[in-house]
């Protein structure tokens, strides 16, 4: 039943939910009284004139802004009207005003344009990038922060704006402020924002994940926080089916005791190719690095080396576990192509020599360092044997240059090079110290290698400047070689 109260001025509506029931003529007021429900604002106004005509009166929104800008020549007024009335079709006007303020470095007014512009036309990634690259004026706040601060005071930030604002604020140690914005609905939760917050604070990230119904991320965060009870309750409440790996992890780490053996869960995950989930579980289970976990550690590494050698490489780099079968895992590393990791595990010379032969797949600096360390830890023969590789003379030279006279004996190095006909290695190694050589035999080895390498200038320098060689022996050697430019050596003939 519609309710209306007759007054001298017409009708006063007392119920906003009234619907039309009557049209009545008021002789005293000279009006047609229409009792009606609310009309859609976009439909304009409905009225009745004295002739009884029912008229619908509206405004052509498309003509308002052109009229104000062209007829009245009042652009600021047109901007205000378009912003307040949320008029469509005037995006270009706001973009023009944006550009004018932006080029004038008036970032505050530019942000206000973004606040009132219809349809969020000035709140896209394109305009955010403009502010990110803009230079601050007079040592003030970064333009992007000015822009976001104005938006925040008038509107809820969209996903991209929220991410751009929360990042710097949290990194400045003002996490509580960002949390308040999230609680008050001033920022928009999203998975990208949650991914960032995971690197800062898991509890904050969880709140954010829950706000945007990011079920997978929420479950993952619950699991990382060890909140398995809440994880299960959340899945029941939302009807979300947690990933298989997370369920197994929950079974293994049930607060009231494991409902499944870790080894069994690991094998199931391996069969289901849930390597990421398996890695997370095992890193947690094995973090104590206990001797009793030897078999679990060994099997864990074995599986990862079959499926994800890159993950194993990272774990070895962090030196997290030490109770596994070193020799066996060394062989698995070699099979997986992680030759430098295999070398770190091997202790037998035969294994080391077989593995180190893959010089094209092992960083040279690692090999040089490794040969020195293994020679110290074991015995020099390990280093000497590694010098017999004819396939990589330069590498053998680097090893000799690094460890001769320290861990390895220089004469033994030269003997090995000569024995294996690695003349270039002899020459390159001794050339680096030729000016300081005082040992007759080493100097003569250098001369022999230089002659074979056709480096006669080096021979001439040694013959001329050195006094450590046996002149007769040197003369006989040079005459035997019948060098093309023998005049340089006449003083010893």
Image: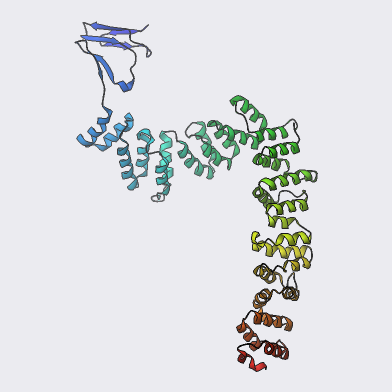
The image position of residue 163, as x and y in percent, is: 49, 40
Q: Nearer the viewer, residue 476 or 134?
A: 476
Tell me the quarter of the image containing the N terminus. Answer: top left
Q: Nearer the viewer, residue 26 or 219?
A: 219
Residue at x-position 41% and y-position 41% = 147
Left or right of residue 1, residue 187 in this image: right
* Total marks placed: 0
In this rendering, is residue 415 above or below 171? below
Q: Give the colouring mode of the picture.
A: rainbow
In this rendering, is residue 409 above or below 239? below
Residue 238 figure quarter: top right
Residue 274 figure quarter: top right
Residue 82 figure quarter: top left
Can residue 382 be seen? yes
Left or right of residue 415, residue 67 in this image: left
Residue at x-position 62% and y-position 84% = 456
The image position of residue 174, as x and y in percent, is: 53, 41
The image position of residue 202, as x and y in percent, is: 60, 38
In this view, the residue farthest toward the right is 292
Left or right of residue 315, residue 122 in this image: left
The image position of residue 283, as x and y in percent, is: 69, 43
Can residue 104 be seen? no
In this rendering, is residue 485 above or below 330? below
Tell me the quarter of the image containing the C terminus. Answer: bottom right
């Amino acid at each position: 039943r519609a309710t209306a109260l007759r007054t001298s001025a017409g009708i006063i509506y007392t119920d906003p939910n009234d619907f039309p029931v009557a049209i009545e003529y008021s002789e005293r007021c000279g009006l047609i009284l229409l009792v009606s429900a609310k009309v859609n604002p976009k439909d304009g106004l409905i009225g009745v004139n004295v002739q009884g005509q029912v008229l619908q009166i509206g405004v052509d929104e498309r003509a308002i802004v052109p009229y104000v800008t062209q007829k009245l020549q009042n652009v600021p007024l047109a901007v205000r009207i378009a912003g307040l009335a949320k008029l469509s079709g005037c995006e270009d006007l706001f973009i023009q005003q944006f550009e004018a303020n932006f080029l004038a470095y008036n970032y505050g007014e530019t942000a206000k344009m973004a606040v009132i512009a219809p349809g969020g036309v000035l709140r896209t990634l394109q305009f955010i990038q403009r502010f990110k690259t803009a230079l601050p004026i007079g040592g003030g706040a970064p333009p992007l922060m000015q822009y976001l601060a104005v938006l925040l005071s008038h509107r809820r930030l969209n996903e991209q704006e929220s991410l751009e604002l929360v990042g710097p604020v949290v990194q400045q140690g003002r996490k509580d402020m960002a949390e308040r914005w999230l609680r008050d609905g001033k920022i928009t939760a999203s998975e990208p924002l949650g991914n960032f917050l995971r690197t800062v604070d898991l509890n904050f990230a969880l709140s954010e994940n829950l706000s945007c119904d990011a079920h997978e991320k929420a479950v993952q965060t619950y699991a990382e926080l060890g909140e398995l009870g809440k994880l299960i309750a959340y899945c029941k409440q939302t009807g979300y089916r947690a990933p298989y790996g997370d369920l197994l992890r929950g079974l293994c780490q049930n607060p009231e005791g494991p409902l499944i053996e870790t080894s069994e869960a690991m094998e199931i995950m391996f069969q289901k190719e849930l390597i990421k989930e398996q890695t997370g579980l095992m890193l947690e289970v094995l973090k104590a690095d206990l001797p009793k976990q030897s078999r679990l550690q060994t099997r864990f590494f074995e599986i990862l080396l079959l499926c994800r050698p890159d993950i194993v490489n990272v774990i070895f780099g962090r030196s997290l576990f030490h109770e596994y079968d070193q020799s066996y895992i060394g062989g698995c590393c070699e099979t997986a192509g992680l030759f430098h990791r295999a070398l770190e595990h091997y202790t037998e010379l035969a294994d080391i020599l077989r593995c180190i032969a893959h010089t094209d797949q092992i960083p040279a600096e690692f090999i040089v360092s490794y040969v020195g360390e293994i020679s110290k830890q074991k015995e020099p023969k390990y280093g000497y044997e590694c010098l017999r590789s004819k396939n990589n003379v330069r590498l053998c030279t680097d090893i000799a240059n690094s460890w001769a006279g320290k861990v390895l004996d220089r004469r033994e190095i030269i003997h090995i090079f000569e024995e294996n006909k690695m003349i270039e290695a002899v020459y390159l190694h001794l050339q680096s110290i030729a000016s300081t050589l005082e040992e007759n035999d080493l100097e003569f080895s250098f001369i022999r290698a230089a002659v074979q390498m056709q480096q006669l200038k080096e021979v001439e320098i040694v013959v001329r400047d050195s006094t450590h060689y046996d002149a007769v022996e040197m003369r006989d050697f040079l005459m035997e070689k019948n060098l093309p430019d023998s005049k340089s050596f006449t003083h010893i003939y």
